[in-house]
Image (cartoon, rainbow, N blue to C red):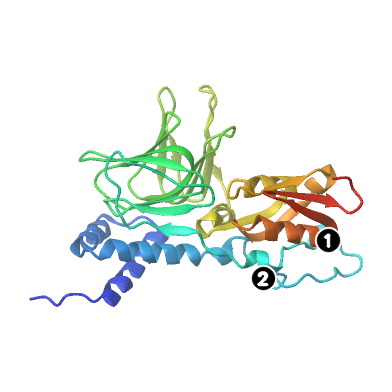
């Protein structure tokens, strides 16, 4: 009789499988071996979820690119004479002490289930085939899994799909369009007033829609879905560090590199009921660079006030930022 694997053995195997999946699509033989491992012990899927969570956390340091220097994440110092603050600004202090807000939900949802997250919540959802869906703040999906296909509909918000190899296709429906893959890691974002945004992290994804030409997306590509049926849709190749920055929300973080303070404030509004208001147009246009806790708009605002010589006034669930001497 074969000796039962220990939990440590299963965790080690899960880490090795996660590393193989991160390197790219599995070969058919590897895919069969992966499925055999996944189905062989009831502890395997939970171990894979833990390995995936650790893998996501390990990407944090890449979010601001290879030239990012963590040294400036210390208490603010006076900028050297002759050097502009807006050029040297990298946010500091308590704003980088991130508390990850991922909830690991190990219960596999039944077919037809609708799963949602509240504001500020991030949830990891396992599927029966070994794939996972990571839901960002204020997002909803509907799951359908049958003998012919693995299907998820993104109703609103943002989700990252980590698709395990399976003979059945994996599809994501969003706004009448269909994304299809056999194995990939990709993000789909659907926010009101903005085009649907698809970002492929690894693997290969095909986009299909009625009366349109299919579009193939490889790793490190992005595509904004157009409502204009006559418009040609072409994926944009982007740098790996930009992909990592775009996906930093998976660790409960927000990464900025040159966005305006107004854009940063709008992003924080997705994750918290606290609103950042900036009445000074010049201050609102200041560029932001840094890595912040998504659930800490107050810490972010304090850093802004320090660096830009601004005042901060908190009124209940509202934070007002203004330049010293400017009218509130």
What is the secondary structure assignment of the residue under circle 2?
A: loop
Q: Quadrant of residue 193?
A: top right
- Check the image and name the residue furthest to the left: 1
Viewer-proximal residue among 56 and 94: 94
Name the residue located 80 percent from the left edge and 62 percent from the top edge: 306
Q: Position of residue 262 (x, y in %)?
A: 73, 45
- Tell me if residue 183 comes above or below residue 83 in the rendering: above
Viewed as shown, does residue 307 lie left or right of 6? Answer: right
Which label number is shown at residue 70?
Answer: 2
Q: Position of residue 237 (x, y in %)?
A: 55, 46
Q: Quadrant of the N terminus?
A: bottom left
Q: Quadrant of the C terminus?
A: top right
Which label number is shown at residue 85?
Answer: 1
- Tell me if residue 2 comes above or below residue 138 in the rendering: below
Q: Position of residue 30 (x, y in %)?
A: 27, 60
- Check the image and name the residue furthest to the front: 316
For the residues labelled 2 and 1, the Cα–Cα distance comes to 17 Å
Q: Position of residue 90 (x, y in %)?
A: 73, 63
Check disc 2: other Cα within 10 Å, few if <14, some if 14-19, many if 20+: few
Viewer-proximal residue among 53 and 30: 53
Note whether residue 251 is visible: yes
What is the secondary structure assignment of the residue under circle 1?
A: helix
Name the residue located 31 percent from the left edge and 63 percent from the top edge: 46
């Amino acid at each position: 009789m074969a000796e039962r694997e220990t939990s440590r053995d299963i965790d080690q195997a899960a880490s090795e499988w996660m590393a193989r999946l991160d390197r790219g699509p599995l070969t058919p033989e590897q895919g069969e071996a992966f499925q055999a491992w996944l189905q062989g012990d009831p502890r395997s899927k939970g171990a894979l979820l833990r390995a995936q969570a650790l893998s996501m956390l390990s990407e944090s340091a890449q979010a601001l690119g290879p030239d990012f220097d963590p040294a400036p994440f210390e208490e603010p110092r006076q900028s050297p004479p002759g050097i502009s603050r807006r050029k040297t600004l990298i946010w500091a202090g308590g704003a980088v002490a991130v508390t990850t807000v991922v909830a690991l939900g190990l219960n596999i949802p039944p077919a037809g289930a609708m799963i949602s997250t509240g504001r500020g919540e991030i949830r990891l959802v396992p599927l029966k085939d070994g794939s996972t869906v990571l839901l960002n703040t204020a997002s909803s999906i509907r799951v359908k899994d049958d003998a012919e296909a693995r299907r998820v509909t993104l109703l609103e918000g943002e989700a990252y799909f980590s698709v395990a190899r399976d003979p059945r296709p994996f599809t994501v429906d969003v706004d009448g369009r269909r994304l299809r893959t056999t194995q990939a890691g990709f993000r789909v974002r659907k926010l009101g007033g903005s085009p649907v945004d698809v970002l492929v992290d690894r693997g290969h994804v095909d986009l299909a829609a009625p009366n349109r030409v299919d579009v193939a997306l490889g790793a490190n590509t992005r595509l904004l879905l157009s409502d204009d049926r006559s418009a040609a849709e072409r994926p944009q190749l982007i740098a790996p560090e930009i992909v990592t920055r775009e996906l930093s929300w998976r660790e409960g973080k927000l990464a900025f590199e040159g966005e305006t303070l107004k854009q940063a404030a709008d992003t924080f509004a997705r994750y918290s009921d606290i609103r950042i208001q900036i009445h000074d147009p010049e201050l609102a246009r200041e560029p932001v660079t840094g890595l912040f806790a998504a659930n800490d708009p107050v810490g972010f605002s304090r850093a802004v006030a320090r660096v830009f010589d601004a005042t901060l006034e908190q009124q209940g669930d509202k934070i007002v930022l203004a330049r010293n001497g400017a009218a509130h």
